[in-house]
Image (cartoon, rainbow, N blue to C red):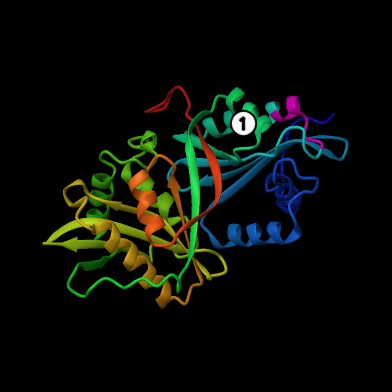
C-alpha cells in the first residue's frame, strides 16, 4: 500500500469522478458532471488540492479541497464503502487533509453531506466536524412565474465598486444581526474575508452586486452571480438590515434579482437557504421557488483559531 499522496493536475478528472459521485449509486460521476466542474474550477478564482490513498491502482481514500478566498475551505468527500473507498483509509486521508489545511492558518472548513448518506455523515463527525444545519437548494424559472420589477422610486440601486466597498461591508455586517441564515458562521471571519469569499462564487465576481438604498439609508443588499454556462443566476447572498425588516425590502430585493436575471437572458435562478430560516423560505416560495435538493452542512474549526469550538 502506498502512502497518502497529493493528487496531480493530470488526475483531476479521475478524482472528481469519486468526489462528485452520488452516495449509494453504482456508478461514479458522469463525464458530463466532471467536465462541468472542471469548467467551474477554470472560471472561478478558487484554488484546489486533493489527497488520495491508493492500494495499487485503486483509490481507497480521497479528499478534494477547494481553498476559497477569505481563509476558508470546502471539502468534497466520497462515501465510505462506495466504489472501493475504505472507511479506515478515508479516515486517514481526511485527518491528513485537515492537518494540512490547519497549517495554512485557515479559519474554518466546511463540508456538505447528502441527508441519506449515513456512512459519510458518521465519517465527517468522527473527523471532528459539527453539524450546522440543512441547506435547501431552491430554483425557479426567470421568466415564469411572472414577477414585477421594483418600481422606479422604491429604492436607489447602488453598485459595488471601490468607492462603495465600505458601505457594502457595513451593510453586510448589519444584516447578520439576528440572522436566521447559518448564524453559527457570524463573527468567524472579518468582513473583508467574507466579501472575498462571496466574490469567488460563480463567474461574475461582484459585477452583479447592489445595495438597496431607501430614505437615504442602506436598507439591504443583493449579491448575484452567474454559473459557468451563464444560463443560471445564483443569489449568493441577500440580506436586510434590522431597521428595514418587515417593511417589504426582501420582496424588493428579490424583484430586483429577477429583473437583473431577465436582463442577462438567464433561464433559471438558484438560491441556497438555511432550512431554519422560515421567513426567507416563505418569501422564496411566494416567488415560485421550489426545493430541488438538500445538503447537511458541517463545520470544522481548529482549536487555536478565533471562534473555534
Q: Tag 1, which secondary structure?
A: helix
State left or right for residue 274 relative to residue 11.
left
86 within the magenta span: yes
Residue 282 lies, in percent from the top left, at: 37, 51
Judge by depth and name the residue closer to the eye, 222 or 201. Answer: 222
Of 89 and 291, the residue lying toward us: 291
Magenta segment: 84-90
The reply to whether residue 162 is visible in this rendering is no
Q: Residue furthest left?
A: 215
Give residue 127's quadrant in the image. Answer: top right
- Position of residue 219 relative to residue 6, above or below, is below
Image position, residue 51 (x, y; %): 69, 38
* Position of residue 89 in the picture relative to residue 141 (left or right): right
Q: Quadrant of residue 183?
A: top left
In the picture, residue 112 is in which quadrant? top right
Estimate the x, y position of residue 77 in percent, counting from the top left: 65, 39
Q: Which residue is mark 1?
A: 121
- Of the 4 image quadrants, the one containing the C terminus is top left
* Left or right: 79 as drawn, with respect to 113: right
Q: Check if residue 151 falls in the magenta segment.
A: no
Q: Residues within 10 Å of mark 1 (few under 14, many from 20)?
A: many
Residue 130 seen in the figure: yes
Amino acid at each position: 500500500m502506498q502512502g497518502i499522496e497529493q493528487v496531480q493536475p493530470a488526475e483531476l478528472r479521475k478524482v472528481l469522478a469519486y468526489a462528485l459521485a452520488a452516495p449509494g449509486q453504482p456508478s461514479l460521476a458522469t463525464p458530463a458532471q466532471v467536465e462541468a466542474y472542471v469548467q467551474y474550477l477554470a472560471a472561478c478564482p478558487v484554488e484546489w488540492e486533493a489527497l488520495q490513498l491508493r492500494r495499487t491502482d485503486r483509490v481507497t481514500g480521497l479528499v478534494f479541497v477547494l481553498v476559497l478566498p477569505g481563509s476558508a475551505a470546502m471539502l468534497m468527500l466520497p462515501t465510505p464503502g462506495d466504489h472501493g473507498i475504505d472507511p479506515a483509509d478515508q479516515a486517514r486521508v481526511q485527518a491528513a487533509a485537515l492537518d494540512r489545511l490547519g497549517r495554512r492558518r485557515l479559519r474554518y472548513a466546511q463540508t456538505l453531506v447528502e441527508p441519506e448518506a449515513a456512512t459519510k455523515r458518521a465519517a465527517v463527525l468522527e473527523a471532528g466536524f459539527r453539524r450546522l444545519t440543512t441547506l435547501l437548494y431552491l430554483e425557479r424559472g426567470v421568466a415564469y412565474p411572472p414577477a414585477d420589477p421594483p418600481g422606479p422610486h422604491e429604492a436607489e440601486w447602488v453598485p459595488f465598486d471601490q468607492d462603495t466597498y465600505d458601505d457594502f461591508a457595513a451593510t453586510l455586517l448589519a444584516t447578520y444581526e439576528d440572522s436566521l441564515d447559518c448564524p453559527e458562521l457570524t463573527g468567524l471571519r472579518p468582513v473583508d474575508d467574507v466579501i472575498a469569499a462571496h466574490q469567488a462564487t460563480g463567474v461574475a465576481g461582484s459585477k452583479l452586486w447592489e445595495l438597496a438604498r431607501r430614505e437615504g439609508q442602506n436598507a439591504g443588499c443583493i449579491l448575484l452571480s452567474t454559473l459557468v454556462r451563464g444560463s443560471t443566476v445564483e443569489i449568493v447572498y441577500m440580506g436586510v438590515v434590522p431597521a428595514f425588516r418587515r417593511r417589504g425590502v426582501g420582496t424588493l430585493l428579490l424583484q430586483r434579482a429577477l429583473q437583473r436575471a431577465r436582463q442577462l437572458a438567464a433561464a433559471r435562478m438558484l438560491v441556497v437557504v438555511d432550512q431554519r430560516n422560515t421567513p426567507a423560505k416563505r418569501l422564496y416560495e411566494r416567488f415560485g421557488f421550489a426545493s430541488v435538493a438538500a445538503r447537511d452542512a458541517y463545520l470544522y474549526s481548529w482549536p487555536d483559531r478565533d471562534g473555534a469550538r
